[in-house]
Amino acid sequence: MLKEEIIDDPESIGYAVMTDQQVLDSLQAVTRPQDITSVDSADIYDAIDPTEYGGLTDADKGILSDIFSLSEVRVQGNTRTALLAIFGAGTATRTSLQALTTELISRATEIGIRRRLGLGLIQEARR
């Protein structure tokens, strides 16, 4: 997996012109966005601006009430679409909700490397 990443460079990161240390640093840098599949309903509650909530329709408040009744909320698919539709583009709540649905990970994590990387592993993979 590591060898294929470095040799094939599927994301065109530029490993071929990097030193071993630069490759290691690049693989471990926490810069890659990844979708989160679920969050606690309390996190959604905390992300909502009280003033914006006050301006919602009763129907929208009902949808939110249903979401708040769940202990864990899947934030992809229909749930995400519903939440983002309730709060308009550019609102503080929408921005906060969008931030809840992604996290930053390293390229190593993204490709499934679960062990600690070191220069020796990079050098071995480049052979």
Image (cartoon, rainbow, N blue to C red):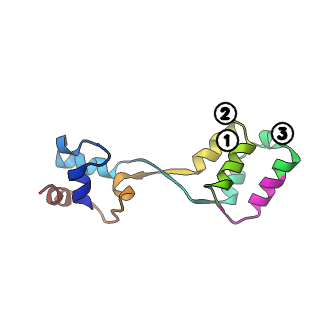
- Contact flag, marks 3 and 1 (Cβ < 8 Å): no
Q: Secondary structure at mark 2?
A: loop
Front residue of 46 and 81? 81
Q: Is residue 121 left or right of residue 105?
A: left
- Contact flag, marks 2 and 1 (Cβ < 8 Å): yes
**The disc labelled 2 sits on which kind of residue?**
Gly
Rounded to the nearest angstrom, the CA distance separating label 2 from label 1 is 7 Å
Residue visible at 68% across and 45% down in the picture: 84
Front residue of 78 and 28? 78
Q: Is residue 71 above or below residue 119?
A: below
Identify the mark nearer the N-term, 3 or 2: 3
Q: The magenta stretch spans which residues? A: 62-73
Front residue of 81 and 22? 81
Question: Which percent across, then down, holds residue 54?
Answer: 84, 42
**Which residue lies under the disc numbered 3?**
55
**The disc labelled 3 sits on which kind of residue?**
Gly
**Which residue lies under the disc numbered 1?**
94
Does residue 16 belong to the magenta stretch?
no
On residue 90, the disc is 2
Rounded to the nearest angstrom, the CA distance separating label 3 from label 1 is 14 Å
Q: Is residue 127 above or below residue 25?
A: below
**The disc labelled 1 sits on which kind of residue?**
Arg
- Outermost top residue: 90
Front residue of 69 and 1? 1
Residue visible at 80% across and 57% down in the picture: 65
